[in-house]
Amino acid sequence: MSLGKPVKQLIAARRPKVAAPPEEVPLTPSAKAFRGAAEVARAGGRRAAGPTLLSDAEVAEFFRRLHAIQPEPRGELEHVNAFTLLVAVVLSAQATDAGVNKATRALFAIADTPQKMLALGEERVRDFIKTIGLYKGKARNVIALSERLIAEKGGVVPDDRDYLTTLPGVGRKTANVVLNMAFGQPTMAVDTHVFRVANRLPIVIGRTPEQVEEGLLARVPAQYGLHAHHWLILHGRYTCTARNPQCQRCPVADLCRSPEKRV
Ligand code: SF4
């Protein structure tokens, strides 16, 4: 039996209105592929619900704002050349930048090359850095890496990640910091702040620093590549803090989809 036109109109008018699905913001192919893999990874092999990644346009806007606030961000570890930067980053593992700076000011004043560091010797280096956690092992590494640089590279820190990561105490993150700050390469050193901020917004979803590094390298617009890791670190250190994120004064709060957002 067919219903008359007025009855059909009445039924249609009473049908509950269903909200239109949110508009899909286009992602680049690499971001799409990364999102798929990352969301599966987060779910431990299954797809799971959770905040969707920021779109490419939102990622660009995130960095545009941080760039506008601080166009030339600097790392906070004090150094005078590539070698002292390398040593400072090695010393900064599980220590604060402020604590490292306090110890290295006097150390670098008398030992700013591998040759001078080696001449100083492990015991004296230990004395300079004894306020830093794990200082005994770190002093050993500083002397050992100085020896290697002298024997294998003429005392020069090379812009070579594969080589740098063979040095004692130097991991991928340390090498990325040195390549970025001393050699101007657009690397992504993922520390605890970068890891948290990237996963929170989320710009990427990654369970390991390597996944987050890979995702950020795929997603950060080229013009922001050089300073991206500093902006993320500073945002994480001073605004998007681990325990008490300062969402009320966060310059990217409207972009953020984190369930931890407090606005
Ligand atoms: S709104 Fe809050 S959680 Fe989101 S990025 Fe800003 S500080 Fe972090």
Image: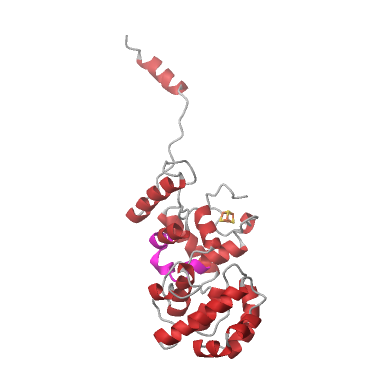
Q: Quadrant of the N terminus?
A: top left
Q: Position of residue 18 (x, y in %)?
A: 45, 31
Q: Quadrant of residue 15?
A: top left
> Please, which colouring scheme is shown?
secondary structure
Instruction: Locate residue 157, reporting x and y percent.
Output: 44, 82
Pick out the residue farthest to the top.
1
**Residue 153 picture location, percent across and down:** 40, 85
- Relative to residue 102, is residue 215 drawn left or right? left
Compared with residue 101, is residue 116 higher up or lower down, i.e. above or below? Answer: below
Q: Quadrant of residue 126?
A: bottom right
Residue extent of the magenta highlight: 216-230
Whether residue 11 is visible, yes or no, is: yes
- State the residue in front, 60 or 107: 107
- Viewer-closest of 15 and 243: 243
Residue at x 40%, y 60% (from the top left corner): 214
- Work out whether residue 3 or residue 127 is closer to the camera in this orientation and state it: 127
